[in-house]
Amino acid sequence: MKTFISHSEEETLAFSKNLASYLQKGDILILCGDLGSGKTTFTKGILSFWGLESEISSPTFTIVNEYSKNSTNIYHFDVYRLEDSDEFYAIGGEEYFDKGICVIEWGELIENILPKKYLKISFSRDTNNENIRKLNFIPYGERFNKLIENL
């Protein structure tokens, strides 16, 4: 496990943009944490690597937003409103896993159906400073073990 402490939104954006430089087709990121803990900001940083940061919107009601740039497909999911993993199957969610990079907010809700290789990132806020976020990176699979060593 690796931990990153962000002291500002700008630090979170820069860190996630750097992470994006290592991502490739088939990678899955699970973002866990309370409302307002930084999951969507983190996703914005990932999209900024491809120049797509101005296009981001939270997919809370649409479940998934699709982005494409330079032959890279990025799928931004928000599964907060799903009842269970069966609903994810019903919308064909698992079909996205091999098509591009998947960033799944509230992904712990469907963790039981994920492929064996993914990176789980848990977000938490500091109770003493509203700008500080603690990000814990938990790798599943050798690729993600190596990836977090580079961060």
Image (spheres, rainbow, N blue to C red):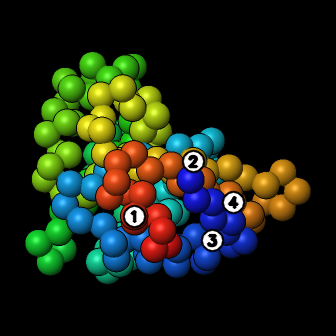
N-terminal of the two: label 3 or label 4? 3
Q: CA distance from mark 2 to mark 1?
A: 18 Å
Residue type at the position of mark 3:
Glu
Image disc number at residue 133: 4
Q: Which mark is residue 122?
A: 2
Q: Position of residue 23 (x, y in %)?
A: 30, 67
Q: Secondary structure at mark 1?
A: helix
Does residue 102 appear anywhere in the picture? yes
- The amino acid type, in three-letter code, at marker 1 is Lys
The residues tagged by marks 4 and 2 sit, at their Cα atoms, a distance apart of 10 Å
Which residue corresponds to the image point at 17% horizontal and 69% vertical from the top-left? Answer: 72
Question: Which mark is in front, 1 or 3?
Answer: 1
What's the distance in space between the residues labelled 1 and 3, CA to CA? Answer: 26 Å
Sequence-wise first label, 1 or 4: 4
> In this rendering, which labeled residue sits more in front, label 3 or label 4?
4
Q: Position of residue 109 (x, y in %)?
A: 44, 29
Which of the two residues, 25 or 54, is positioned nearer the viewer here? 25
Q: Gap between marks 1 and 4, in whole Å?
A: 23 Å
Pick whichever, 112 or 140, lies toward us.
Answer: 140
Mark 3 — residue?
9
* Label 2 vs label 1, nearer the camera: 1
Q: What's the residue at 61%, 76% (across, down)? A: 11
Name the residue that disc number 1 marks: 146
Q: Position of residue 39 (x, y in %)?
A: 52, 54
| Horizontal relation, residue 70 to residue 135: left or right | left
Give the class, few, some or many, for how many residues have Cα within 10 Å of label 1's Cα (few <14, many ≥20): few
The amino acid sitting under disc 2 is: Ser
Left or right of 7 on screen, residue 68? left
For the residues labelled 4 and 2, say whether their Cβ atoms are less than 8 Å apart.
Answer: no
